[in-house]
Image (cartoon, rainbow, N blue to C red):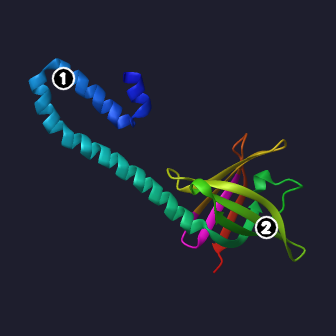
C-alpha cells in the first residue's frame, strides 16, 4: 500500500499520509486536535514551496527575456591563455528562445570585413549564480561559456573545462 501510494501521489501527499498514520497510532484524541491545528500549517508550508518554485521560474523567464536578441562586442584572449591560434575578435551574438527555458546562441565574427559564422550553442540559466552557461565538449576541447547581463551590457568568459583557467573575456552591448 505504501509503495503504491508513494509512486502515484505527489511527495507532499505521501508524507502527510505517513504522518497521519503515525500520529493516529499514538493517541486518537490528540491526533484529531493536531490534525485541526496542523492542517493550516501544512497548507502554508506547501504554499511556500510552490511560491518559491514559481519565483525561480519567473527569475529564469525574466533572465531569458533579457538575453534574447542581438548583441555586438568583443571577445578577447586572456594574456595568460594566449597562444598562436587565439585572436581577439569583433563578435555578433544572436540569442533565441529554445525549449525548457534555455536559449540558443548563434555566434558570428568579423573576418576580412565580413560577418562569418563561428558556432552555435545551447545555454541554460543558472538561477543561483545569475548567469547563462554552456558546456562544450569535443574530441579536442572541453570548455565552459558563461554570460551575465546587466541592463544592455553583457559580459562573459570562456573557461577551460579541465583546468578551469580563464581563456577569453567577452564584452557586448545589446543592438536596438
**12 sits to left or right of 121:** left
**60 sits to left or right of 74:** left
For marks 1 and 2, give the one nearer the viewer. 1
Identify the residue under disc 1: 24
Q: Residue furthest bottom?
A: 176
- Crowding around mark 1 (Cα neighbors within 10 Å: few <14, some 14 to 19, many 20+) is some
**111 sits to left or right of 22:** right
Identify the residue under disc 2: 108
**113 sits to left or right of 6:** right
Q: Is residue 17 in sight in this rendering?
A: yes
Magenta stretch encompasses residue 152: yes
Magenta stretch encompasses residue 87: no
Residue at 82% x, 62% y is 118
Name the magenta segment's main secondary structure.
strand
Residue at 35% x, 46% y is 49
Residue 85: name its quadrant.
bottom right
Q: Against 31, is 133 above or below?
A: below
Q: Position of residue 24 (x, y in %)?
A: 18, 23
Amino acid at each position: 500500500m505504501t509503495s503504491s501510494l508513494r509512486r502515484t501521489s505527489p511527495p507532499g501527499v505521501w508524507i502527510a499520509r505517513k504522518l497521519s498514520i503515525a500520529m493516529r497510532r499514538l493517541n486518537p484524541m490528540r491526533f484529531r486536535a493536531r490534525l485541526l491545528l496542523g492542517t493550516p500549517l501544512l497548507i502554508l508550508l506547501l504554499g511556500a514551496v510552490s511560491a518559491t518554485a514559481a519565483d525561480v521560474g519567473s527569475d529564469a523567464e525574466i533572465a531569458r527575456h533579457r538575453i534574447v536578441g542581438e548583441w555586438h562586442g568583443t571577445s578577447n584572449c586572456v594574456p595568460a591563455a594566449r597562444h598562436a591560434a587565439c585572436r581577439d575578435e569583433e563578435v555578433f551574438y544572436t540569442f533565441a528562445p529554445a525549449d525548457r527555458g534555455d536559449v540558443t546562441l548563434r555566434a558570428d565574427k568579423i573576418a576580412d570585413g565580413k560577418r562569418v559564422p563561428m558556432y552555435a550553442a545551447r545555454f541554460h540559466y543558472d538561477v543561483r549564480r545569475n548567469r547563462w552557461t554552456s558546456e562544450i565538449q569535443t574530441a579536442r576541447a572541453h570548455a565552459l561559456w558563461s554570460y551575465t547581463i546587466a541592463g544592455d551590457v553583457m559580459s562573459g568568459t570562456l573557461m577551460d573545462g579541465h583546468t578551469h583557467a580563464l581563456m577569453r573575456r567577452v564584452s557586448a552591448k545589446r543592438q536596438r
